[in-house]
Image: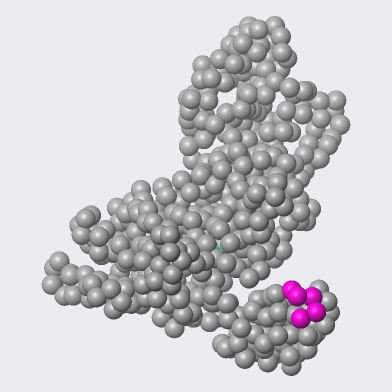
Amino acid sequence: MSLTLETIISLAKRRGFVFQSSEVYGGLNGCWDFGPLGVELLRNIKEQWWRAMTLRDDIEGLDAAILMHPRTWEASGHVEQFADPMIDNRTSKARYRADTLIEEFIERLRAKGKHEQADLLDQRLRTAQTADDYYAIIIEAQIPDPVSGTRDWTPVRYFNLMFKTYVGPVEDSSNIVYLRPETAQGIFVNFKNVLDSSRRKLPFGIAQIGKAFRNEINTKYFLYRTREFEQMEMQYFIRPGTESEYFDYWREQRFQWFLSLGMREEMLRLKPHDKLAHYATAAVDIEFKFPFGWGEIEGIHSRTDYDLRRHQEYSGKRFEYTDPFTGEKFIPYVIETSVGATRSLMAFLCGAYAEEEAPTADGKTEVRTVLRFHPLLAPVKIAVLPLVNKEGMPERAEAIYRDLQRRWKTQYDDSGAIGRRYRRQDEIGTPYCVTIDGQTLQDGTVTVRDRDSMLQQRLPADRLIEYFSEVLSS
Ligand code: GAP
């Protein structure tokens, strides 16, 4: 089975994972709403990340405001440099990111077997820096507009991705603030506050989860590139000279985190950056194999002391650390781990999706859709199903449901044939179904069906809490 994006989007909508934002008004491009199951899945991903980051000796949490002093973004370089090269086609009026337009053209060349030409363009793209560089590639390679097929291009211009707004009632340039394009800067500007209030020593990290906004030129691939999204970022502050050791450490930790939550290794890869930012000494992406191809889900960056030094310069406040043993003063270096919560939700959703043959009650087979979520991520953990709606089964099932629901997200479903109900739960990734049948009324046992193996075992109903505490905890 080769999974398509349409299949995922359609399942996500039908079962209440993700809806288009303000759909009743025709939607808002690049924005999505998380429905009843999506919000559970997103919270579970964030919870697992938060636990992995903060249930250790060396990382503190933070929740900084989305709106920050505008000098923050001057210091970080975002006002000047956080821009993408864009180009318009005069005939179709379509707007593209110039680098993406070239990349997609290269892919088309490769698909046609024109590898030499593709390699040459790829080489030029890697070294392109300015608007003129991108424009020259597009014109010289005669790249057509994918929509109109014409080559009627405007010059390439840079477009800043930060959303601007104003504080207070006056829309004046002195009142401009930006919606943060990354959560990281909230961590950098609070470095001293966290250091002093928590009395930390290096190395230590600060972790934060929160919304970020980018006015992307082309949103695409569902949750992959959106204008509003959520990030989970951690800045690890270290002594200069130890960056390579900690870079390797965090790259390994973060890769293992995805595996520990059920992602298959063949769906992941590490991709070192070809081009490093001027302040970075190393950068690697963790990529996931999406239905459209490989795409970044997390970046691990060795950022030197660039950010803290810039904030020291722009704020006039000291960002130095004093070594408690030697008295030496220095600005710490930083290893950053930065993962999209919403983008990784899409990866977890795609990675969990399977279609496979399953037996029916009358001995035939049918194709079932199943989301093989790790139990810690599954939006619903247990479904309670009375086999029939009579003979005291609903009452018994209801009591069991109430008991389980107090501890885990549990669904009660009594409508339709039992096989159909199992399929409905498979399709949303519920790891366990508890069925109350005739035997339950006689000996107090129920069946517990495992989503992946579809095998059932009988357990005493009064042992369910103990059983699920074990199987749903790791
Ligand atoms: N502080 C570093 C930073 O923000 P980034 O590579 O720009 O680095 C980190 O973003 C992660 O944030 C990405 O790996 C991706 O998961 C997520 N992300 C970035 N832009 C996004 C967008 N437009 N839509 C959804 N997720 C995005």
Residue 337 seen in the current view: no
Left or right: residue 154 versus residue 230 is: right
Find out whether residue 242 is within the magenta segment.
no
| Number of callouts | 0
Left or right: residue 412 versus residue 415 is: left
Residue 224, image x and y in percent?
Answer: 63, 60
Find out whether residue 91 is within the magenta segment.
yes
Q: Give the residues drawn in magenta, as a range.
A: 90-94
Position above or below: 337 against 360: below
The residue sitting at the front extreme is 170
Residue 122, image x and y in percent?
Answer: 67, 85
Residue 192, image x and y in percent?
Answer: 25, 64
Name the residue located 25 percent from the left edge and 60 percent from the top edge.
193
Position above or below: 408 against 168: above
Pick whichever, 271 or 96, lies toward us.
96
Q: How is the image coloured?
A: one colour
Q: Quadrant of residue 186?
A: bottom left
Name the residue located 44 percent from the left edge and 83 percent from the top edge.
278
Residue 404 seen in the current view: yes
Residue 367, image x and y in percent?
Answer: 81, 40
Provide the major secondary structure of the magenta segment. loop
Name the residue located 68 percent from the left edge and 14 percent from the top edge.
437
Name the residue located 74 percent from the left edge and 74 percent from the top edge.
94
